[in-house]
Amino acid sequence: MPPDYGPAAVVVRAPAHAAFAMPAAEFGRYEVVLDGSVIMDGQEIGPPGFRYVRGEQAEPLVTGDNGASVAFLTFDRDALEGGIMGEGLAVEAAEAMARAI
C-alpha cells in the first residue's frame, strides 16, 4: 500500500547504536519497543516501552547496546473520527496492538 493510503504498521530491527526515525505522523503514531532497548527523550526504554508522536518530525530513536526491534503503528485520517468502535477488522487491529504493547 502507498504510505498515504491508510494506517500502517512497520517493524524495524536495528543493530546497536543505530539512529532511525519515521516521517512526521500527521494523525499520530505509536512507536513500541518490542525487543532490546532504545534511547528516547534521553532515557533508555525497553519492552514494552513506547511513545506517541503526532505532527512534526519526532526525535530519532537510538538503539541500545544490544540493538532493538521497534513497531511503528501509524494512524490515518480516520483517527480523527473518534476512535475504534463496532466490530470487525478495526477492533481486531486494536486488540493486536494491545497484545504487542
Image (cartoon, rainbow, N blue to C red):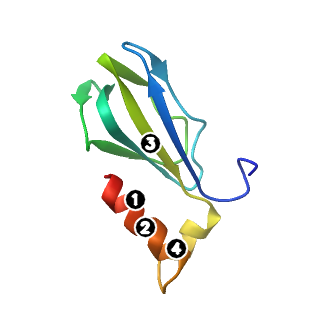
Q: What x and y, as percent, mark residue 29?
A: 48, 50
Q: Secondary structure at mark 2?
A: helix
Q: Residue at x 40, y 62 (%)?
A: 96
CA neighbours of label 3 inside 10 A, class few (<14), some (14 to 19), many (20+): many
Discs 2, 1 touching: Cβ within 8 Å? yes
Q: Which residue is mark 2?
A: 94
Q: Give the left or right position of residue 101, taking residue 23 as reference.
A: left
The residues bearing labels 3 and 2 have C-alpha atoms spaced at a distance of: 14 Å
> Which amino acid type is marked by label 4?
Ala
Name the mark on residue 39. Answer: none
> Which amino acid type is marked by label 3?
Ala
Q: Is residue 69 above or below residue 75?
A: above
CA neighbours of label 2 inside 10 A, class few (<14), some (14 to 19), many (20+): few
Quarter of the image where one finds residue 32: top left
Q: Which residue is mark 3?
A: 71
Q: Which residue is mark 4?
A: 90
The residues bearing labels 4 and 3 have C-alpha atoms spaced at a distance of: 18 Å
Q: Which residue is mark 1?
A: 97
Q: Residue at x 32, y 26 (%)?
A: 38
Q: Secondary structure at mark 1?
A: helix
